[in-house]
């Protein structure tokens, strides 16, 4: 299981190390390399870490990063869920940027003699700047291996029925506990508009997820809105932008709004600080009266079940092969035992 990553601490030095790795990925920032490295190391990494560290500090827990805690909990829950149907399956999590790294976890699995490897990026909607970077890192590491495992990669699960239902169940639960707002906003992480023009399917897959989720909730088209958050830099990103959309809703007279982030499967800086704090403040300042952030699915059992179903769908023949190998090994062991017994008699 691969998640984006997080700094090791809510401190400028740790944030600087994390941002240096994250923003150095050519799939994340697609501008001429030399120019970008000058901007990154000459400006961004000098000034942004301190400001970002304050944001991380506002959501940090006594146990550490929320994203790391949720991801670890998801891995444990998935391992427990899979034992009943796939005994012996090793479930590990890694971070694309930060620790535990993909390289570290893959090498630990190699030492255990793993022969079949399934990589599950925790990004429901495919994007070159997220899912593809995981593939890059996995393939780069495998170039160093002599004995390669059988490898499979999950491209995404943006329209899996079980995933959609887990999102809908989370929203229904929130409405039952807190009441329902006048408008439901689905906020997805943004990417530059240029990515869409170059053929990235992310924009389309976000719209598919939002449409299916609205259908599962029985929402009329005017009861919800799709937006994109986390814009970085001056270039145009996918629109409409989340915060300006919330401000517009408030000025239009919408008093109560609910915001949910379907593309994030675990709460993190982008949900707990950018949405639950900054976006809330902007909506209330613009005249809104009540703002509810609906937390991510995190380690809910229905989401873990959705991941389990995706794994089963991707590895059905592996399970059959393991059963065959197990029977073959058992038969071989029995033959050896009989041979040993015959030798002893002689």
Image: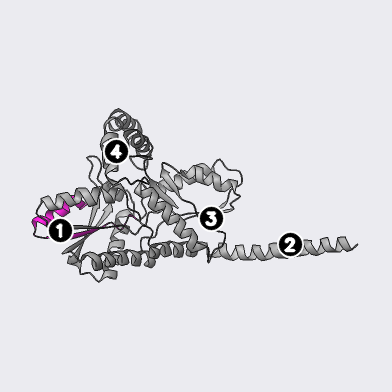
> Which range of residues does the magenta coloring cover?
238-264
- In the image, 313 versus 18, the foreground residue is 18
- Residue 167 in view here: yes
Label 4 close to label 3 by CB (< 8 Å): no
Compare marks 1 and 4 and give the one earlier in the sequence.
4
Q: Position of residue 146 (x, y in %)?
A: 61, 43
Q: Quadrant of residue 16?
A: top left
Q: Which mark is residue 3?
A: none
Mark found first going from the N terminus, 4 or 3 = 4
Pick the front one: 170 or 160:
170
Residue at left offset 43%, top offset 50%: 2
- Label located before the other in sequence (1 or 2): 1
Label of residue 53 in the image: 4
User: Which residue is outermost to the front?
Assistant: 62
Element under label 1? strand
Residue at numbered disc 2: 333
Whole-angstrom CA distance, mark 1 to mark 2, is: 67 Å
Pointer 1: what residue? 290
Numbered tag placed on residue 90 in the rendering: 3
Residue 190 in sight: no
Mark 3 and mark 2 lie on one chain; the one further toward the N terminus is 3
């Amino acid at each position: 299981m691969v998640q984006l990553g997080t700094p090791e601490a809510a401190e400028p030095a740790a944030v600087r190390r994390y941002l240096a790795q994250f923003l150095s990925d050519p799939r994340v920032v697609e501008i001429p390399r030399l120019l970008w490295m000058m901007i990154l190391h000459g400006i961004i990494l000098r000034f942004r870490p301190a400001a970002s560290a304050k944001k991380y500090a506002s959501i940090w827990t006594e146990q550490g990063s929320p994203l790391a805690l949720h991801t670890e909990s998801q891995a444990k829950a998935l391992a427990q869920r899979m034992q009943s149907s796939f005994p012996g399956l090793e479930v590990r999590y890694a971070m694309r940027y930060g620790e535990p790294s993909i390289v570290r976890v893959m090498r630990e699995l190699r030492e255990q003699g793993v022969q079949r490897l399934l990589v599950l990026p925790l990004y429901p909607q495919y994007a070159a700047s997220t899912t593809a970077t995981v593939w890059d890192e996995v393939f780069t590491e495998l170039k160093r291996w002599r004995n390669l495992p059988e490898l499979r990669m999950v491209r995404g699960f943006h329209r899996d029925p079980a995933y959609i239902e887990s999102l809908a169940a989370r929203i229904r639960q929130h409405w039952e506990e807190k009441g329902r707002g006048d408008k439901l906003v689905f906020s997805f992480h943004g990417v530059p508009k240029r990515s869409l023009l170059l053929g990235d399917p992310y924009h389309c897959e976000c719209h598919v997820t939002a449409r299916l989720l609205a259908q599962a909730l029985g929402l009329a088209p005017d009861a919800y809105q799709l937006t994109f958050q986390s814009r970085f830099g001056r270039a145009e990103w996918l629109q409409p932008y989340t915060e300006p959309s919330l401000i517009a809703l408030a000025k239009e007279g919408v008093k109560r709004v609910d915001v949910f982030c379907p593309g994030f499967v675990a709460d993190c800086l982008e949900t707990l600080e950018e949405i639950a704090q900054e976006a809330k403040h902007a909506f209330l300042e613009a005249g809104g009266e009540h703002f509810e952030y609906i937390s991510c699915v995190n380690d809910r059992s229905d989401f873990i079940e959705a991941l389990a179903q995706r794994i089963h769908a991707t590895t059905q023949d592996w399970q059959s092969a393991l059963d065959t190998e197990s029977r073959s090994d058992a038969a071989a062991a029995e033959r050896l035992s009989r041979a040993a017994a015959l030798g002893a008699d002689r």
